[in-house]
Amino acid sequence: MTGVTDTRRLVFYDAEGALYFPVRDGGTGKSIFKIKPKGASNRAEDAIHLEDWLDVARAMLIDGLAARCRALSGGPINYLRFGAQKLVRYELDPELAEALGIAPTGVAGEETSEVSRAAIEAAMDAFDAWRQTGAQDEIFGAFGEPRDYWVRSTRDRENRVYPTKPLVGYLRGKTDLSGGWGQRNDAASFLHNAGFIIVDAEDRPVPPPERYDHLIRDAERVRLCARNYHIEPGREQGAAEVSIRSGDLAREMGLENAFPTICDALGGAKFQTLCALPPPRFTTPNPSSTTTFTYALAADGITPTMTAPDQAPVPPTNLILYGPPGTGKTYATAWEAVKLCLGAAADPLRDDRKALMAEYKRLCEEGRIEFTTFHQSMSYEDFVEGLRPVTDEGGSGFRLTPRDGIFKEISRRASTRPDDDFDLPEIDRSRPIFKLNMIGKGWRPGYDVSIATGRIYWLFGGKLDWSDPRFEDKEALAARWRETYPEATLNHASIGGTHYFRYGAKIGDYVALTHGLDRVFAFGRITGDYEYRPDLARPEVEDSPNSRTVDWLWSDPVGVERAAFYSGAFNPAHPLCVLNDSFDHDAFEAAIFGTKGIAEPHVLIIDEINRANISKVFGELITLLEADKRLGAANEIRLRLPYSGRNFGVPANLHIIGTMNTADRSIALLDTALRRRFTFRELMPDASVLPVDCGGVNLQKLLATLNARIEYFFDREHQIGHAYFTACTTRDDVAEVMRFKIIPLLAEYFYEDWGKVAAVLGDGSGRPERFLRAVPLEPPFGLGEEDIDDKKVSWQILETFDFADCAA
């Protein structure tokens, strides 16, 4: 990677790798660079004004003058001089370097030993041109046939391998130089220190000698190679982001057991400064061969100013919005959910209901927002997991199998959602996973054959043909085996394992290739039945004719550690067996496929959360909702679920938003465990959002008056929300809401006590009729005086309402 761009043609680096560049000053009325002459002060009137990058480069690199510079990461602008205390290395636009007759890169105080990626790739272009046309033959033709060292191009070329000496000779204008490692400017050393990978003629990495101190190593080399072979090619291709998998980089560089160093280098601040990158997302476990770092790229190489805050994980949200009916709780959950998913990018949507709901719908379709409503019959089996009957093959019966509920399903999506850049397979967690152990010290060639052919081979079946249907019966298979090996027992691998391989593992089941006690090297889905194929026998698999086809979903010669997803060591005495319930699918998929280091937020919305029996629905998982008990938190807890028997934890990026209608149930009556784990935010009626004049009705006054009377006669939790009236545009709309929604609601509140309903509406003794009419009821004939109580009335709803008390 080079920090040079079309608008920044000269850059410098300090000892820590931070990038600096000369800045223009517009204070004089035109854009100029200010150069400080030797012996001059820092006053503006003493500065030399230059307009061209070529003149600035000459002043700083040849004349040794200071210019006003600033760090790419920001900060003050100061006069800085190359070779002084701060600036120790430069990079210059190759065109300007050619004009000045100097190298495109250089280090203060010594002959240049590093050159830019662009210059080296340009030398490769020139070498290709020489092969075709003979151009630059005086340089390239002087070296003859390459013998020892080649270098791998960072670009996608037909032939990515080039001899080292002709390239360095072209860059340095020399034909007499060494191609090895002994001196800093020898060809292999020169390109190695520039962050290029030295290889042999077959493109296999050549490790640098340990005895030379002038060769870059460890994290510094990792940073340069990652920059040259991943970040800069991504920028050239216009990619929005680039992902680097530590295992891939290790293979490219020829490193072994270096994952801690690689992950430390890729995740550190120095790499971000070197490449002008924001902090990356990364997968877990970290460090490991599968750890993947994903970097957001800026088109011009400048770090986006807002990426760091956007990348920070949002603490888990457990929120309940509560209040009377009609206060906009359900709509508020849409805003809260979209805001949690999008962060600051959601701000423009807050006052645009149509755009907000469109985004809400999109996130629901993506599976990042899930909506459910609690009710009295809601159960743990509906919400977390339960048993469902599944018909057996042939329809002869049924069996009960665990089935994920709403909460477990969205937890899984939040935990395992892959990066958008990868088309990762879906794994059917209901199918068994078979462990197939690769035995012996010479297992690696057999592994390579399995991956290359898309097959698994069974090495314990002898050279016998087990395709006869009678061998679906284990006893028949054992009898045939004992004809050759009489001492074999029924549970011996040659019998039990062969039966598993032949019949036990079904098409659609999964297989993991393992070696030793602790590593998995491949994972795939079984796609074919057992086959006896002597024509496919290979010496790498002990000439076994027994195999099955597999669709490999993942493979890695480095492998992943078992402990991250399986509690018990692999038993080599059982080369083929089913992994038990301690297998953690989430951790396994994260290990082999990778997930975002800061996973995308997911939101579960629970409407009417207070209508269900909370302790019954959440069960033991109520503990896992706390922020410090989430996956990856300081006090992470995983519980074993009762039906599936699998360990389960709540991911930190799953947010829960509930709504609660206080007219149904007071907040004071909520389950104490729920109250302690949720934040409660009250949403009360807001009359100010309603119009003052809606067909001659002052809706603000109408709502405020009704609620003041409700609070007097009942309580504040049964007020009427403003949402009842927000859609009203005419007087008739208001009357319809009053007739069909408000009056029935008041009757429910006051248990059909129409006298109180009338009082809330402003009707009653001695007042004009507005909404209700009291019609006196005559006592039934024959009722004695002593049986007649107070006068009774029949309340009738008027055909036409009078809004005079709330006229606009």
Image: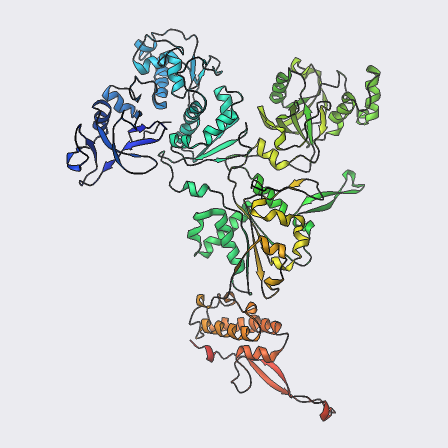
Vertical order, 305 against 490 (above or below): below
Q: Nearer the viewer, residue 59 or 120?
A: 59
In the picture, measured across the screen, residue 308 lies left or right of residue 19, that is right
Query: Where residue 429 sits in the image (x, y, percent)?
Result: 66, 37
Q: Nearer the viewer, residue 55 or 419?
A: 55
Q: Nearer the viewer, residue 802 or 618?
A: 618
Query: Where residue 599 sits in the image (x, y, percent)?
Result: 52, 40
Quadrant location of residue 233? Answer: top left
Vertical order, 701 against 35 (above or below): below
Identify which residue is drawn at 63% across, 50% down: 622
Vertical order, 564 against 397 (above or below): above
Q: Which quarter shows the N terminus?
A: top left
In the picture, measured across the screen, residue 795 lies left or right of residue 38, that is right
Quadrant location of residue 780? Answer: bottom right
Query: Where residue 519 sits in the image (x, y, percent)?
Result: 62, 25
Q: Which quarter shows the C terminus?
A: bottom left
Q: How many marks?
A: 0
In the picture, measured across the screen, residue 376 lies left or right of residue 628, that is right
Q: Nearer the viewer, residue 177 or 389?
A: 177
Outermost bottom residue: 785
